[in-house]
Amino acid sequence: MPSKVHVQTTINGEAVEYLCEPRQSLLEVLRDVLHLTGAKEGCNNGNCGACSVILDGCLVNSCLVLGAELEGKSLETIEGLAEPDQLHPIQDAFLENAALQCGICTPGFIMAAKALLDQNPNPTEYEIRYWLAGNLCRCTGYDKIVRAVQDAAQTTSSEVSA
Amino acid sequence: MAEKKDYKVVGTRPIRHDGLDKVTGRALYGADFQTVGLLHGRVLRSPHAHARIKSIDTSRAEAHPGVRAVVTAKDFPAVEDKIADLGEGAANVKDLQDNVLAGEKVLYKGHQVAAVAAIDPHTAEEALELIDVEYDVLDPVIKVRDAMQEGAPLLHEDMRTDEMGEKSDKPSNIASHFQHKQGNLDKGFDEADVVVEQEYTTETVHQGYIEPHNATALYNPDGQLTIWCSTQGAFTVREQVSEILDIPVSKVKVVPMEIGGGFGGKIQVYIKPIAAMLSMKTGKPVKVLMSRADVFEGTGPTPGSYVRVKMGATKDGRITAAEAYLAFEAGAYPGSPVGAAAFCVFSPYKVENAQVDGYDVVVNKPKTAAYRAPGATNAAFAAETVIDEICEKIGMDPLEFRILNSAKEGDIRVDGPPTPRVGFVETVEAARDHPHYLAPLEGENRGRGVASGYWPNFGMKSSVAINVTSDGTISLVEGSTDIGGTRAAVAMQAAEVLGIPAESVTPTVADTDSVGYTDVTGGSRTAFATGYAAYEAAQDVKQQMIERAAKLWEVDAGDVQFADGVFSSVNGKEQELDFKGLAARLDETGGPIVGRGTADPNQPGPSIGLHVVDVEVDPDTGKVQILRYTATQDAGKAIHPSYVEGQIQGGAVQGIGWALNEEYIYNEKGEMTNASFLDYRIPTSLDLPMIDAIIVEVPNPGHPYGVRGVGETPIIAPPAAIANAVYRAIGIRMKELPMSPGRVLKAMGKI
Amino acid sequence: MRAFEYVPAKTVAEATSLLAEKGDQAKPLAGGTDLIVMVRENRRQLERMVDIKDLSETNVLSYSPDTGLSLGAAVPCHKIYADDAISAAYPGLIDAAKIIGGTAIQGRASVGGNLCNASPAADMIPPLIVLGAICVIAGPNGSTREVPVEQFCTAPGRTVLEKGELLVSFEIPPPPKHSSSFYLRFIPRNEMDIAVVGAGASVVLDDTKTSFVSARIGLAAVAPTPLLADEAGASLAGKEVSDEAINAAAEAAQAIARPISDMRGEAKQRTHLVGVLTRRALNGAIQRVKEA
Ligand SMILES: Cc1cc2nc3c(=O)[nH]c(=O)nc-3n(C[C@H](O)[C@H](O)[C@H](O)COP(=O)(O)OP(=O)(O)OC[C@H]3O[C@@H](n4cnc5c(N)ncnc54)[C@H](O)[C@@H]3O)c2cc1C
Ligand code: FES
Ligand code: FES
């Protein structure tokens, strides 16, 4: 039996093929096989959210998904968020609000915030805090992160209505 | 220096220079480093809290397919017994080595014992299971007061207490006892109308940075070692690795990658020498990563402690005497931050009669490391709640009490030095006048508490080089790793000098071969000291530019002025060029300009803060909820106010975590039972309100823009402020940290 | 992490035979939020993971007021609370689905996985118990059987499932008139925590909403398996809704708790909390009936 699985999938809108061992997590595949190191490992057991990605439209911890499970799926990672000439409004809002210090949690927070705003464009402060509770940040105390998401919500929802 | 001025760049809020890379996932942190031919290392750790190593057999691991090398303490070179400087503290080199790979004994669960390099991380992990270690398990000792008992299990059989400078003759876990004294304690207590004495205990807590430690090392046959890693200080990594592996510093190059948090915990080396040893054996680059459990069990947390504080005051609120007994857990090797605790415990206040005793005690826990104002939080939890009790007894507003007793510039601190100018009264007034303090707090089981936190801050050494680019921008090369926006804070100080926008500076954090010696990003020193070096480098550039303008205009340098970003000649010809215009003309005036600045400033200027918190306690479950939080702090001058607020907010929240839930939980075998982010409970976004950060600016006379470090102070006050609030809510004084629901229920007598 | 084989099953029959073939060396993989962590931490070694989350049977999610809810074992939490009709009919289930892990965990964590992992602290189990859920189990060779949820777990990490068996779905009866359910747990943080104690309640009130017709109470993290506190629930039948009746039920629930002390809480604390949470769960469910 071959030790590796062949996977065909879509990542950030592009068809991607790779080989991985069944025991390699999606996070390992992203980082070590595909060299997409934007998703970070903070705990490797679902507790910190640093590895957050969006799988078939749903926020997941890539450390708790097997690379082999990606066959036929569609994945969004932090690397796919910005346009060549423009950041995503959430990325802009994080910069404007100084919502990062060390930045290790930032890709995870931005992906989580995107998943939130995709389904709830006008969340309350409580909804934001509840949604982001699986993403740990040790530097900021969350204040500026919550404000950044509030700001991004305003920008994105006013873009939609405009 | 340090007059109130209208600044153009200082005090504004530009987008940080490294921001874009960090919001797009492009910034490369230590674990992101890739190179060809990379091997992966993993570390075998002690399953026991205390044991003698009888034997280590690595042969099965070495034979495992895919394994390239195994190392143990046997692979270390012999080193001498001497003290090495680590940036924020010093340590014995032999202890450093023994902590990296245990020699004769393992001293805590998680102590590194051996390491493997293999073709992939999973193979390396498999091989760890094939290393056979025989242990002789010994009784552990976990708590400081148990370790101080006679007859307690001894960690180091040859350790003798340093008793106020003299070595005692009996073996002991007490590494040292020191004492500070001033005035007449008995007289002071006699003068008091009220005396309050209480005992406090705090548990071990971890910095909890989200990025685990990492290191990739490559050793070349010519003896040159390169290490790519996340660290608070590339130079301290260089010094430590050089000492531990006995390689000249010039042969070690450390490349600091982006770093995912440190808070003091990424100064000491753990796996960096191991990656180097594995590379020496294999001739290949080797990457070693820690798991989250490794981080909790194997890296330095901040100590658990036992603290007793006694204070006396008159009816009208003057402190007459204060006494503290501080016993701190150092972890497996001497070196707890009890010294810092001793000089912080009463330092906000004028205390004429005082005595402080400090004990540094080894226990079977990981060697403690720095954590944001190390030692001060433990001490303030005690002192600031004793003060609250005194205020209650004499019926005085706790803010008024602080204003009345605040130490003034020149008042002598119990540990000797005079108090520098610091805005203690100003932070208290800012809190007093804040809408939070003015708003009444209503509702059952709710209470408001306040507390102060004081930290002296550090200066230490920094180097900066500035290159002028022909388009009128500058590149700034510094040695301080950027953990929270310091590229921006340092760049802005250079920009202010040169009259250019912050965006015209391109800051780079360089490796140890490419920039002058720079101490750690720690001690709240980076915006202060590296900022100072950037200021000096920019002054150097300015002077050189003035000379160039003089050449261009054929005037004396002394006739060229620089103001508001414009060079002008005062020889009557009205010649003018702004920085950009002159930068375009360097080639015709003598070629490139490189400015250099070094700093070792000795007046870091302390920082102090006052925190106000409203809590609600659930009387049925003992859970404490933070309703509202305001933190004031003297920043001297906030270079980039957003990131100063960020430090205050983040520090306050770490303090809240420490106050409410964070602790290392041990079983009777001395094993930590909660080594994960699920059970070591740092605050989540849902546990908190917004944190209102109020910046107070009393300029530090020791810095050209008046900067005081701000990073550490905000963690100090929260536990005491929250304990005081809990008391107002339910009438019970909590004397243990954390004030977890179970402890609160117990204190309420419900279980 | 040791090497293992990953096989996505296409039918229930294929899944059961893939499982049967390897005995205890094979395990179904649903959301993986328990299984992957366990295997990674070497607490469990496997030769094969059988992915069962792309089967139509494990993904059913259909509710009708007449027949109740058919809930596939692999349906993740977020799909359950996204359904308004189910949320209205079984609020106690939703309480639990919304607090498991964080958002990203809820994107993967299934109800079946929560039950089959058989943690004493599992949040989904008390609401399933109080709602009278029945487990539909498929065995090798096409056999099926049904087991009430409260009988499913036998010890920490152990269940009634035998070699090759797969939990396919749950059947949950339709909620009776004037009924509702509620689940809550006590945790030191507000999210991302494992229950120190969990308590669920379902109540059926009479037409005036002043007396109990019946009630069920389920508890987590107070015994080796989640418990149905049947006497506590039964004590309420026919009683007027009152603090006295609720306190008596809470005391009866406390009486069957046999908690341990560990890093998440002390035995005494847990027993105390059983009383507190049982009262809160009952009051919560009653409130919901009254507001309906
Ligand atoms: C960070 C984090 C937080 C968590 N928080 C909570 C919490 O708050 N409350 C809580 O209760 N749990 C919590 N959990 C545990 C876990 O998320 C839940 O138990 C979840 O519901 C498990 O579902 P799953 O689909 O991921 O199961 P899996 O991990 O896929 O499977 C779990 C077990 O069940 C078996 N299994 C799965 N499906 C079937 C089936 N159909 N038939 C037979 N066996 C099957 C698997 O083989 C495995 O042994 C948490 C986990 C993490 C990582
Ligand atoms: S690394 Fe995946 S959640 Fe922490
Ligand atoms: S910015 Fe450092 S962990 Fe969030």
Image: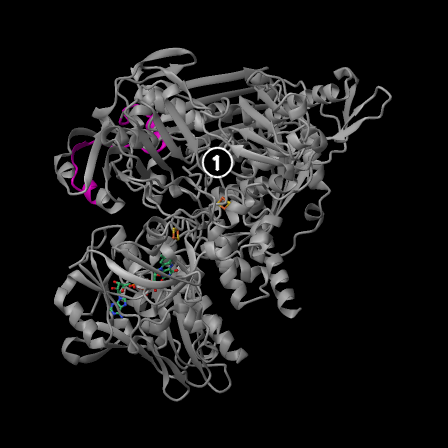
Residue B290 shown left or right of residue B476 in the figure:
left
Q: Does the magenta stretch include residue B133?
A: yes
The one nearer the camera, B448 or B580, is B580
Q: Which image quarter: residue B136?
A: top left
Q: How many labels does the image show?
A: 1
Pinpoint residue B535: horizontal percent, then vertical percent: 64, 25
Foreground of the two, B636 or B363: B636
- Residue B729 seen in the current view: yes
Q: Where is residue B626 in the image (x, y as percent from the top left)?
A: 56, 51
Q: Is residue B620 visible?
A: no
Report which quarter residue C246 is drawn in.
bottom left
Instruction: Give the farthest residue toward the bottom.
Output: C66
- Magenta span contains residue C25: no
Farthest right residue in view: B572
Residue B361 x, y percent position in the rendering = 37, 25
The secondary structure type at the circle numbered 1 is: loop
Between B441 and C136, the one nearer to me in the picture: C136
Q: Quadrant of ligand 1?
A: bottom left
Residue beneath the point at 47% across and 54% down: A78
Up-down relation of residue C102 to residue B671 (above or below) = below
B742, above or below C99, in the image: above
Q: What residue type is labelled 1?
A: Phe
Indicate the chain on which mark 1 is placed: B
In the rendered view of the protein, which quadrant contains the N terminus of chain B? Answer: top right
Is residue A101 placed above or below B557 in the rendered structure?
A: below
Q: Position of residue B525 (x, y in %)?
A: 56, 28
Q: Give the range drawn in magenta.
A: B126-153
- Residue at the front extreme? B588
State the residue position of label 1. Answer: B263
Q: Quadrant location of residue C203?
A: bottom left
